[in-house]
Amino acid sequence: MTCLPGKTDKALGLVIDLDTCVGCQACVTACKGWNDQGYGVPLSDQNPYGSKPSGTFLNRVHSYQVQAEPAPMIVNFPRSCLHCADAPCVTVCPTGASYKRAEDGIVLVNEEACIGCGLCAWACPYGARELDADAGVMKKCTLCVDRIYNENLPEEDREPACVRTCPTGARHFGDLADPTSAVSQLVAARGGYDLMPEQGTRPTNKYLPPRKKDRPDQASLLAPLLDIQATGFAGWLDRILGKI
Amino acid sequence: MNPAPSVIIFTVLSGMGLGYLALLATAHDYSGMAAFWHWAFGYALATIGLMASAFHLGNPQRALLAFTQWRTSWLSREAWGAVLTLLAFAPLALSDWLGLGLPRGFGWLGAGLALATVLATGMIYAQIRAVPRWHHWTVPLLFLGFAVAGGCLLAGFRWPALAALVVLGGAMVLHWRIGDGAFARAGSTMASATGLGRPGAVTVFEPAHTAGNYLLREMIHVVGRRHAAKLRAIALGLGAVLPALALLVLPGVAAFGVALVLHLLGALAQRWLFFAEAEHVVGLYYGARGA
């Protein structure tokens, strides 16, 4: 049923550290790799080696330039389903294919019931859903529901593929409804925030802001070397031109 | 948003057909073969429109499942409304054709359902908060305006059609005027989308992918906004102003023929623009706002 559960026992989700992410795209590749063989139809590609390649991905990493003080910075920004508490994608679904699980809050698509109308993708402010062009069904992050409860996997692998693969530890997985969980404490300590809170979706996933960078005079160890004094003819010219 | 032809045909024809059927059921009382052809035409318009909506589905063979979620989904309510409306008109259509003498009052149930169905079609779009231009009551008003105006033109009611066209013209202008500031009023910006506004101004450094994807094709369509002003003039002129003038100036049946063709072209232009100029907030992640 596409009514949202009033309250979920757990709120499983991701915490993404924008300070640590280096934009290596390993999570994008791991996600695509796992979901080619896991839950539901594989994530298809169209014309992958041609002039206009296109494909379905559940996780994409953007890069933004931020004019921060005192120094501007580049922030790599992974974007995927936020498993919202008030998920607008679920309630618009006409067939009941989209649903939010009462036990752990994961938002899933039952592909057997999906007619591929695309309304859920329109309803999502975050672009988390992509219609698979081959299968005609909606694909989205499953939080690797086929890994996290999978007793055939070694314990350390029972987390989403993106989290497992991240080489810098920028992605964390856990229960955000439990204030004592590691992810909740991380959010509290680092000031984790919601994306587009004005859209009223109450996302489960949180983002940790980049830490303040060093001041430029501390950062630039080369500064003394850059103060080049001209000598000889160039120095004479420099002095003359400076006086005119 | 992507102006898919199937969705444009669906919303324009089903609205006009349902409007016409509602008037056949309440304001006309054709009999015999005349009744058969009028009812058949109305049913054909509405049905072709509704069938067209199936063409943009990825898996249309499961379309019956769309009747299950009427509690939350306007798309599901629209499906129910359409089927119930067409069923509710059936006894009256048969009665008109075969002269069974069913009272006209019976038509009001179907007419109410028809308007409710058009309202639900509008709500499919108006419910989407992520498209600020659509998230407003002017959208169902606009859809109802088109259904009533198109229905009156088909039914051949001169003064009601004129009144409906005036209201429709006003609704179009209102929808555009309110819609133009909707994105800014919704408050979503690159700063809120990334949460990086506090450190400083945010711009795109590098896109997440160099080729196209579903999001760019479906929700970050920019062609329409380039010609929005011209298309608005065309939609308003063909959809409302010129048909109204035709009704005032031209004599007899010719007026309705001309007005109807103009109105249909205007409705198609308006609906194309309705999708093409609507901006989705996901464009913010791609720096695609205001392109």
Image: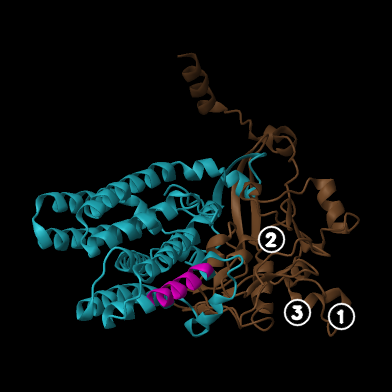
Chain colours: A brown, B cyan
- Marker count (numbered): 3
Q: Quadrant of the N terminus of chain A?
A: bottom right
Neighbourhood count class around disc 3 (C-alpha, 10 Å): few under 14, some 14–19, many 20 upward: some
Callout 1 environment at 10 Å: few (<14), some (14 to 19), or many (20+)?
few
Amino acid type, callout 3: Asp
* Upstream in sequence: badge 3 or badge 1: 3
Q: Which mark is residue A146?
A: 3
Q: Position of residue A128 (x, y in %)?
A: 61, 64
Farthest-out residue, left: B251
Give the structural element (helix, strand or loop) at label 2: loop
Q: Mark 2 highlights which residue? A: A82
Q: Nearer the viewer, mark 2 or mark 1?
A: 2
Residue placed most toward the observer, B152 or B100: B100
Q: How far apart are the two marked residues, 3 and 2, measured between alpha carbons?
A: 18 Å
Kindly identify the amino acid type of the residue bearing the numbered disc 1: Pro
Q: Is residue B234 visible?
A: no
Q: Nearer the viewer, mark 3 or mark 1?
A: 3
Say which element carries label 1.
loop
Say which amino acid is labelled 2.
Answer: Leu
Callout 3–callout 1 Cβ contact below 8 Å: no
In the rendered structure, the residue with mark 2 lies on which chain?
A
- The answer, for residue A63, to whether it is visible in the render is yes
The residues colored magenta run B77-90
